[in-house]
Image (spheres, helix red, strand yellow):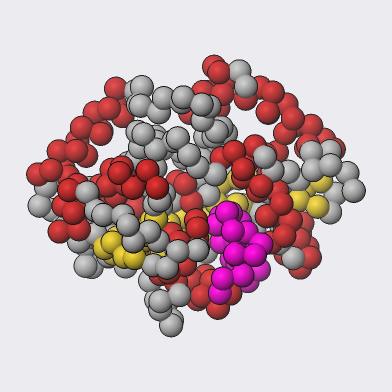
């Protein structure tokens, strides 16, 4: 069997790795949302753009002084998130960016699988404004962000929006996703996606997939939860029915599992805008993460190979 980065698209991946080591090019690629490289040792993730620093100050003021509810009981949207380890100290920043948005969710849930974590003062303020902090049994890993919710409801009727604990979401973030879901409620919508590439009959290395540049729904559009995805109730029911099989085949690749469950039922994914969206990091959250094992060490490719069935591959090859 040829190596994972063999062939023309594999060559693209090798070039990307080489170019990605050039600091200026790497920074530009990250800003454009083309690539998100792993932080090197001693990486300084403090914001460098004045507008980001200003936004952080606004979120801090909102957290300290706002009495506005973090949720809107009339909203049909449910937003979920999980966090772990040292990121727990800063998770309130990501939550505040959602709670302060122009459109608020009907529920905003933070799932924790570590009973030793105690909410900070900032997180407690958000809890008083309606954010739910719920404990679950450990072992789900990155799938904690959605699985406790989808498995807790026998029949879903509301869309679910996934979010990450290390992102500063803009005020219009949820409004954009919700508007897309209302316009076409039966498919998955996202703000950042890749186009799945093939080499022959096999899926090409993940690193060679190209950024999505279309808003057309497609089975080959691969959404990434880092910028937010909204899943219709039918996908949530399918995720519940599929159980925890992801623990064996995609334990560290929640987006791979989420995509596979959707496309196996013929449900496509659409990017909301033609250009992928990527948002600033919450400061002091990038010391760890799954970049190294998933992207740069081929972990995504191994989990992709284990997850998609032959039927899935046929459907993907036939799609555009």
Q: Write the residue at 74% across / 30% down.
A: 14
Query: Magenta span: helix, strand or loop, mainly?
Result: helix
Residue 110: where, in percent of width, then height? 33, 58
Instruction: Using the rendered image of the protein, determine whether residue 258 is visible from the camera's viewpoint.
Output: yes
- Is residue 291 toward the left or the right of residue 66 in the image? right
In terms of depth relative to the viewer, which is nearer, 101 or 148? 148
Q: Give yes or no for residue 254 being in the magenta stretch.
A: yes
In terms of depth relative to the viewer, which is nearer, 166 or 25? 166
**26, above or below 218, in the image:** above
- Is residue 183 toward the left or the right of residue 130 in the image? right
Residue 45: where, in percent of width, then height? 40, 28
Magenta residues span: 243-266
* Count of marks overlaid on the render: 0
Q: Write the residue at 16% across / 52% down.
A: 125
Q: Write the residue at 65% across / 48% down.
A: 300
Residue 5: where, in percent of width, then height? 79, 38
Q: Write the residue at 62% across / 45% down.
A: 294
In terms of depth relative to the viewer, which is nearer, 151 or 66? 151
Work out which residue is located at the far bottom of the displayed protein and give it. Answer: 154
Q: Give yes or no for residue 151 being in the magenta stretch.
A: no
Work out which residue is located at the far right of the displayed protein and give it. Answer: 1
**236, above or below 85, in the image:** below
- Residue 314's quadrant in the figure? bottom right
Residue 207: where, in percent of width, then height? 67, 39
Instruction: Using the rendered image of the protein, determine whether residue 315 is visible from the camera's viewpoint.
Output: no
- Is residue 173 toward the left or the right of residue 189 in the image? left
């Amino acid at each position: 069997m040829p190596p994972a980065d063999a062939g023309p698209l594999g060559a693209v991946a090798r070039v990307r790795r080489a170019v990605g080591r050039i600091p200026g090019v790497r920074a530009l690629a990250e800003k454009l949302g083309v690539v998100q490289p792993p932080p090197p040792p001693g990486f300084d993730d403090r914001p460098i753009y004045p507008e980001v620093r200003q936004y952080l100050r606004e979120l801090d003021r909102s957290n300290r002084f706002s009495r506005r509810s973090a949720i809107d009981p009339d909203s049909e949207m449910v937003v979920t998130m999980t966090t772990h380890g040292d990121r727990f100290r800063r998770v309130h920043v990501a939550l505040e960016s959602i709670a302060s948005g122009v459109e608020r969710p009907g529920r905003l849930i933070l799932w924790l699988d570590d009973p030793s974590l105690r909410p900070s003062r900032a997180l407690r303020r958000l809890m008083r404004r309606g954010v739910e902090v719920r404990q679950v049994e450990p072992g789900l890993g990155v799938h904690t962000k959605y699985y406790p919710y989808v498995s807790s409801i026998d029949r879903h009727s509301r869309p679910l929006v996934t979010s990450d604990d290390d992102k500063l979401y803009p005020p219009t973030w949820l409004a954009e996703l919700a508007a897309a879901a209302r316009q076409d409620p039966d498919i998955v919508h996202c703000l950042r996606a890749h186009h799945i590439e093939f080499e022959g009959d096999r899926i090409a290395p993940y690193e060679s997939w190209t950024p999505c540049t279309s808003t057309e729904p497609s089975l080959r559009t691969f959404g990434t939860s880092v910028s937010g995805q909204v899943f219709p109730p039918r996908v949530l029911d399918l995720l519940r029915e599929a159980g925890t099989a992801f623990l064996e085949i995609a334990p560290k690749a929640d987006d791979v599992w989420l995509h596979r469950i959707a496309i196996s039922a013929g449900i496509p994914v659409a990017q909301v805008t033609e250009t992928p969206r990527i948002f600033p990091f919450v400061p002091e959250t990038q010391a760890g993460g799954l970049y190294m094992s998933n992207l740069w060490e081929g972990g995504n490719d191994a989990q992709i190979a284990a997850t998609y069935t032959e039927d899935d591959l046929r459907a993907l090859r036939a799609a555009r």
